[in-house]
Amino acid sequence: MALPYFYLSTYSSSQKTIVLDEDTSRHVVQVLRMQNGEKLNLTDGKGHLITTTISDNHKKHCTVEVNTVQQTPAIERKTVIAISLLKNTNRFEWFLEKATELGVSEIVPVIGTRTEKEKFRHDRLQQILVSAMLQSQQSWLPVLHEPVGYDSLFTLGDVNNIPHKFIAHCDEQYKTPLVNELAAASGSRIILIGPEGDFTPDEIALALSNQFKPVMLGDTRLRAETAGVVAASLMCLV
């Protein structure tokens, strides 16, 4: 049976004893009813998988002893989804959850011409990423960027350095299936996903002028959050 999995916001390799925060302690002791001597896993979202043993099952500051630490190497091929903030917050949060489970490296919220909502609660959204990472038992937490204006996206150094760049839009122009493009794209990838009303013609033109290839995600028109998940699935698995 897999050991319970919990998040540790900071970790130092010199730590031999760790005191869990109050929320985690309460879950370990009062919800799971774990006892002294039982084992659990911790991760800091930076590749460390820390197997520990409970030494003091206090409900507010549970203490664990470090047994082993494994360092999971970061995936060299980054997968970046740059997606518009959505009017329906629940749908955007659903996208974040699924993208994390699939193993996306970075998520860049974008504010474009047709973006209908610009409010962004980083702390809440970060917690959704943490929960999804733990549920899928991963050791790397995706990087969630602060929202960026659409035009500014193309000036980010990280974006310019990614070799394979795509934009999924609904405009009636020639597009190749993303899965075909990915078959020959061995390096890091980024894809742009627009808001509910899609990108404007000027936004599409700007992306194309910055070497983004137009792609299609299938034969049907998808909601923005569904398009994000489909793109994440393809980019992480192909």
Image (spheres, helix red, strand yellow):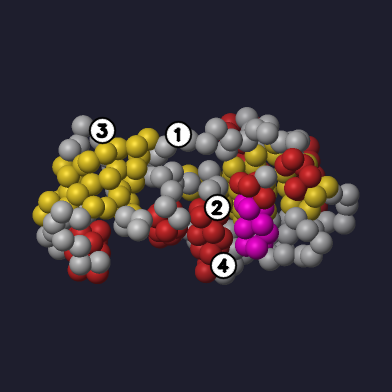
Q: Which residue is mark 4?
A: 91
Q: In the rendered structure, find residue 102 and report the number of the disc placed on it.
A: 2
Q: Amino acid at mark 1?
A: Pro
Q: Is residue 192 left or right of residue 5?
A: right
Q: In the rendered structure, find residue 13 and report the number of the disc placed on it.
A: 3
C-alpha separation, residue under disc 4 versus residue under disc 2 = 17 Å
Q: Is residue 213 left or right of residue 34?
A: right
C-alpha separation, residue under disc 4 versus residue under disc 1 = 31 Å
- Which of marks 4 and 3 precedes in the sequence? 3
Residue 113 visible in the picture: no
How crowded pointer 4 is (Cα within 10 Å; few <14, some 14-19, many 20+) is rated as: some
Residue 224: image quadrant is: bottom right
C-alpha separation, residue under disc 2 versus residue under disc 1 = 17 Å
C-alpha separation, residue under disc 1 versus residue under disc 3 = 16 Å
Helix, strand or loop: magenta stretch: helix
Q: In the rendered structure, find residue 73 and report the number of the disc placed on it.
A: 1
- Which of marks 3 and 2 precedes in the sequence? 3
Residue contact at pointers 4 and 1, CB within 8 angstroms: no
Residue contact at pointers 2 and 3, CB within 8 angstroms: no
Q: Is residue 134 left or right of residue 162?
A: left
Query: In the image, what residue occupies the spot 65% across and 42% down?
Result: 190
C-alpha separation, residue under disc 2 versus residue under disc 3 = 28 Å
| Residue 17 screen position, x and y as percent | 16, 42
Q: Between 224 and 19, which is closer to the camera in this rendering?
A: 19
- Which of marks 3 and 1 precedes in the sequence? 3
Residue 232 visible in the picture: yes
How crowded pointer 3 is (Cα within 10 Å; few <14, some 14-19, many 20+) is rated as: few
Q: Amino acid at mark 3?
A: Ser
Q: Nearer the viewer, mark 3 or mark 4?
A: 3
